[in-house]
Amino acid sequence: MFNFFVDESCYNDSRYFITGSDYNHIKNVLRMKQGDSFLVSCNGKSNLCTLESIEADAIVALITEENYTDNELPIKIHLFQGLPKSDKMELIIQKSVELGVSDIIPVEMSRCVVKLEEKKKSAKQQRWQTIAESAAKQSKRNVVPTVHKTISYAQALNLATELDMILVPYENKDGMSATISSLKQIKPNTSVAILIGPEGGFDETEIELAKNKGSKIISLGKRILRTETAAITAVGMCMLYAETNLNGD
């Protein structure tokens, strides 16, 4: 079932009025007809709708069942990703959104090969946000995660300390026991920051700064992972723990 995201301005009298690119997609690409069903997500809620009519400038979707699905995690995962090379960031955004992150924050770190020019940061952010929205639609999310502007490592740590927990995958002498111990401290509604280094990994100074901010240094296993693999693995671990232990299933 297809899923579309709208804001409050599109709602009136138990109906959503869908315009813009989604209007074209529904009418000309999907070729939906009157009576076809699909999901419309607004303000974190996904409602089951039927296509009531196709107007000259809007698709009119009638709500038939409110709060039809709730596919969000019981925790908030904020992924702080060291800027990677080429199109790896796009893969990281796509997969982490599918896994349930709430926010993605690109971070400039000392070993980042990529150095974004200031004038390119806005265009990159817009491109990445489009990828996040596409992934949210595909995975039937109730919300579209936010891809924030690129920030410095110092700014990232300050932002992360506002959350309940900071997890940093890095070499850990205690191995997976440290990871398991950290995961067990996650409770419903916990906000979790995950810091992932770029291709060159973290600088030792960056790790010391993270420790000073109260970060938990964890392991993702004995093997050395690429930055994109590390991000997906770390988010996946938190997702699995939350889905298994915090949803009441």
Image (cartoon, helix red, strand yellow):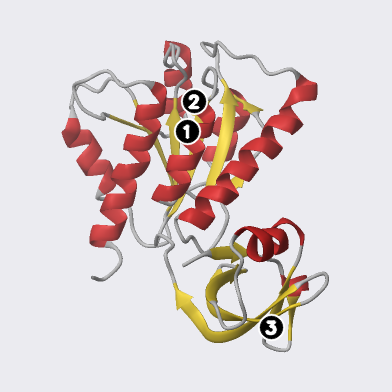
- Image coordinates of residue 228 in percent, x first then y, are 41, 27
Residue hosting label 3: 15
Image quarter of residue 47 = bottom right
103 versus 10 height, above or below: above
Q: How many labels does the image show?
A: 3
Residue under the point 74% across and 31% down: 123
Residue under the point 48% across and 22% down: 209
- Image coordinates of residue 86 in percent, x first then y, are 55, 19
Separation of marks 2 and 3 at Cα, in angstroms = 39 Å
Depth check: 50 or 221 in front? Answer: 50
Depth check: 119 or 163 in front? Answer: 119
- Image coordinates of residue 168 in percent, x first then y, are 38, 30
Q: What element carries label 3?
A: strand
Image quarter of residue 57 = bottom right
Amino acid beneath label 2: Lys
Question: Which label sits on residue 91?
Answer: 1
Is there a contact, CB below 8 Å, between mark 1 and mark 2?
A: yes
Residue hosting label 2: 88
Left or right: where 175 falls relative to 63: left
Q: Which of marks 2 and 3 is nearer the N terminus?
A: 3
